[in-house]
Amino acid sequence: MDRSRSRAVALGLAGLALSAPGAVADPVADFYKGKEIKMLIGQPVGGGYDTYARWFARRLPDFMPGNPSVTVQNMPGAGGVVMTNSLATQQPRDGTVIGAAAGSVSTSPLFGMAAARFDSRELSWIGSLNSEVGLVVSWKDSPIKTTKDIFEKEFIVGGSAASDGNVIFPRTMNQVLGAKFKVIPGYGGTTNVSLAMERGEIHGTGSWHYSSISVNKPQWLQDGSINVLVQLALKPHPNVPNVPTIIDLARNAEERAVLELVFAQQDMGRPVFGPPGLPADRLKALRGAFDAFVRDPSVLAEADKMKLELNKPMPGEEIAQLVRRLYAMPPEAIKKASQAVGGG
């Protein structure tokens, strides 16, 4: 065989080797192989956000190129803003650190929260594990029986901390819609709120996630112990028929815009995200892993066993589009939403 023919054969064999399955280099897999991803969790240990985030972190290596290990670190404070500040300003931007927090971090800077040192439009949104639907509920023996009663009678509701939805949301409904909630904060959590409802100390609560009720008090949704009055989300929950959403209660376009700004955080209820400037190929891999996770049969079986809801998980690009749309809302609507959330 002459030299030129030998060279051609060698090049052909090399080409076949490169085109064989598994032979093509994957720079993302090469980057993550042997590395560790750190997930920062913006809420305390033991709560619902922590449970969802740790579950995702445990299974993430199964779906990531290179199968990196994943560790978690809780960094609570200001509803996830402390963690998001760290992610945006102090952590590496190479895809080795990601975060999980409440959906409210998406609008904290938009509403002028002084502590927020990031632009939500610049975060690398990976996906939201659940579209949360908060429910306004009253105890069966209270004088509040229907949606109409919210606007005609004083409705005494228990709340957790000042920054929690069960305080912010009823105050928003008072300011925007003319509801008559009297919010009693300081109960520390929905467990204490539900006990106060049973004792007759309060009439109900201005926001309680369906996913939380279905785990902690599922019988209350079935035996008439509570009246479900409003769904606090842009879209209704499939298991709560014939109950209006907060958007249904808007009386004009401006009220609708303000309510959408405040309650959009429910649709991206449990987001996972990276810092600004995350390399495009690694963000694509993280989003792909998220999408595979929420569709995987073994994950869905785990969700059933753990009684964790995966209601309309939101892909990362869809979150990014929603955030951009919120930031593009009319300035007057943003101002009123900010005032409503602040209780002003």
Image: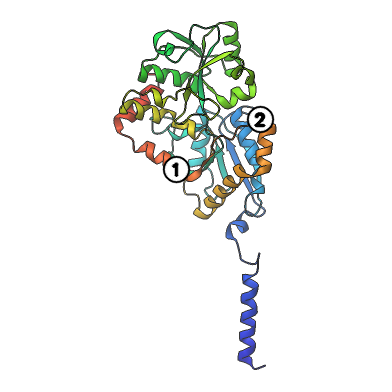
Quadrant of the rendered image containing residue 199: top right
| Label 1 packing within 10 angstroms: few (<14), some (14-19), many (20+) | some
Residue 92 in picture, x, y percent from top left: 54, 47
Q: Looking at the image, which residue is at 62% across and 46% down?
A: 37
Q: Earlier in the sequence, mark 2 or mark 1?
A: 2
Looking at the rendered image, the disc whose residue lies closer to the viewer, 2 or 1, is: 2
* Looking at the image, residue 36 lies above or below residue 266: below
Badge 1 is on which residue? 320
List the single residue furthest toward the front: 242
Mark 1 residue element? helix
Residue 227 in picture, x, y percent from top left: 53, 15
Q: Is residue 12 visible?
A: yes
Relative depth, front residue between 322 and 242 = 242
Quadrant of the rendered image containing residue 15: bottom right
Q: Quadrant of the N terminus?
A: bottom right
Badge 2 is on which residue? 307
